Image (cartoon, rainbow, N blue to C red):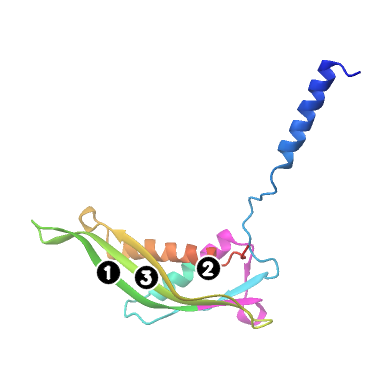
Amino acid sequence: MMRRPTLALLGIVAGALVLSAGCGYSTTRPFRTDIHTIHVDMLESKEFRRELEFRLTEAIIKRIEMDTPYRLAPRARADSVLSGEIVAVKNRTLGDDFDLDLPREMGSTVVVRFRWQDVRTGEILVERPRFVYQTSFIPPLGETFTQGMTRALDGMAEQIVESMEADW
């Protein structure tokens, strides 16, 4: 017959095993394991605003380097290619200062079309014909359109890279 301390010890050990086993969840992000390298084409732009396509391309590259297991590679040696274009950038006034007749807050919307393709098989891994990101900035506090666009392009880059995660 088992004594109480032995039974208690057995219960503690069993509990520790159950807790250490976890629920099967992982803290790693679910990126594809069949892709190892990626080439990011310079994005194009239908907008007349200067350098937005360069800034967004740079933000996407930085996000890929920081957040994914993929390595950047020249097009000829890459497993996959990410390409796209800025379709539209729209600004709108969210609130006016009636005394000064100036905007209190501005909103910007960036619309991008992009495609991520496996160049070995031709399979399209992700395609978004109309991918939208919105942000706002406050001119009376000294925020400029450039600062608002930086925030928008960084947010857009983050969402593009998040869309590269594998489907469940």
In whole angstroms, how far apart are the C-alphas of marks 2 and 3?
18 Å
Q: Amino acid at mark 1?
A: Asn
Question: Residue 16: x and y, percent?
Answer: 74, 32
Kindly identify the residue that appears in the image at 68 percent across and 69 percent down: 36
How busy is the neighbourhood of tag 3: few (under 14 within 10 Å), some, or many (20 plus)? many
> Which quarter of the figure has residue 111?
bottom left
Which segment did they paint magenta?
A: 61-83
In whole angstroms, how far apart are the C-alphas of marks 2 and 1?
26 Å
Kindly identify the residue that appears in the image at 67 percent across and 70 percent down: 35
Closer to us: 159 or 54: 159
**Would you name the residue on which mark 1 appears?**
91
Tell me the tag on residue 110: 3
Please give left or right for residue 14 compared with residue 87 in the image. Answer: right
Question: Residue 133: x and y, percent?
Answer: 39, 66
Please give left or right for residue 98 compared with residue 62 in the image. Answer: left
How busy is the neighbourhood of tag 2: few (under 14 within 10 Å), some, or many (20 plus)? some
- N-term mark: 2 or 1: 2
